[in-house]
Amino acid sequence: MVLIPRPRASSANLSMSSSSSIVSCPTFRRPFQHNSNTPITQTNKLKGFFAGSGSDSMSNPYMARAVVDLTERSPRDVSLLYIGTASYDIPKFRRNQTNAFIDLGCDVTSLDVANQRPDQDEMEEAVDNADIILVSGGNTLYALDRWRYLGLDELLRTAAERGTVMAGGSAGAICWFDSGHSDSADPETYRQYKLDKFKDGEPEKKAGNNNNNPFAYYSGNAQEGDSKEEWSYIKVEGLGIWPGMVCPHYDRIQSNGSPRMEDFDQMLEQFGQYELGLGIDHNAALEVDGDDFRVVSIPGEAGSVPISDNEEEEDGTTFVPGVWLTYVDEEGNVQRKVCPRSGSLSDLLQEVNDPEKHILVDDRVDLCRKENPLLRD
């Protein structure tokens, strides 16, 4: 059965703090406003590109060009820093997610920290010189823990504040927000498993469908017909540069057999009652340019957002990739609303008033850390 997330009627009695908010803004949240120690200018406004998939999005020329355009420079004048910690700096994933930028003419370098400890000066220079910082997909929890261990997290926050474009898909989208719906507890995303799998180069591809249709098994983990694996999605704490809980691959199913959009609803009810959720389809991205946002989709791909009851794309598609806003109403029910294609970020995103009280912790991350131990060097 094909599952399509339908917009649900919102509770009419939620206390509103902003009449222009796209969804109800209750008293424990407020519209997002970038608080900087310096006046906001064209060169230091927050910029980001957050895709629902890592390799599939960042390898796409259309999406790569959208990322580069955020710099407002010619591609040949753009320096891109790739950080592949979440995929353990495995060359295959670096190639997949940077070749489209190289083809555009960007100067691409990488900062490898998953399996080695670079000098502090090396990390600072790499981050300082970047116009774009592109974070790979992969194991979100491991990447964020490793960055915090090395002090790279603060360098990334500083880079965002000075206007560097922060980009990535899947784990590379979750990491910039307060939290995310993550597959970091999937044993096939663990460091030793990945390093062993790719130690002799790229393993032979499994035969199967290309899985470009929504609600198919996500090709990064499983094919339709595979037996279901026993693991659960977990909530992972991000860098908090932008507010909200992000669910990438929103219209996909992974090897545990659980549709991500349905599991995301359950996670919001259990750990995200106070946060605003963002569900990003596999072939979509949320682009942020200061207080402006737009939804970007890979042309020709299907997604979960209905165009209308009587319309379809030129290729016959009636559901396109997009972004959904999800939240728990005052009755405890999860509500969904399609994100507009563009608008003001302060009308879209909402931050909790008291993060210590309202951003709840998923204790299952501790077990995941034991099973996928951090390299401490």
Image (tube, helix red, strand yellow):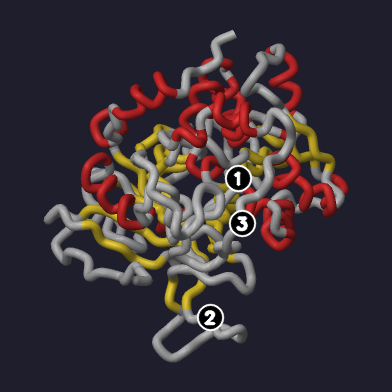
User: For the residues marked 1 and 2, what is the alpha-carbon distance in whole angstroms?
Assistant: 26 Å
| Relative depth, front residue between 16 and 332 | 332
Q: Residue at x 55, y 23 (%)?
A: 147
Q: Amino acid at mark 1?
A: Gly
Q: How many marks?
A: 3
Q: Which residue is mark 1?
A: 168
User: For the residues marked 1 and 3, what is the alpha-carbon distance in whole angstroms?
Assistant: 27 Å
Q: Is residue 364 left or right of residue 139?
A: left
Give the quarter of the image for residue 164. Answer: top right
Q: Which residue is mark 2?
A: 317
> Which label was assigned to residue 310?
none
Give the quarter of the image for residue 5. Answer: bottom left
> Which label was assigned to residue 207?
3
Say which of marks 1 and 3 sits in front: 3
Between discs 2 and 3, the one toward the N terminus: 3
Asked whether the beta carbons under mark 1 and mark 2 sit within 8 Å of each other, the answer is no
Between discs 1 and 3, the one toward the N terminus: 1
Indicate the secondary structure of the residue bearing disc 2.
Answer: loop
Say which of marks 2 and 3 sits in front: 3
Q: Position of residue 328 (x, y in %)?
A: 23, 53
Q: Is residue 329 above or below residue 270?
A: below
Q: Looking at the rendering, in which quadrant would you find the N terminus?
A: bottom left
Q: Residue at x 82, y 51 (%)?
A: 75
Q: Amino acid at mark 3?
A: Ala
Say which of marks 1 and 2 sits in front: 2
User: For the residues marked 2 and 3, what is the alpha-carbon distance in whole angstroms?
Assistant: 26 Å
Q: Looking at the rendering, in which quadrant would you find the C terminus?
A: top right
Q: Residue at x 29, y 30 (%)?
A: 361
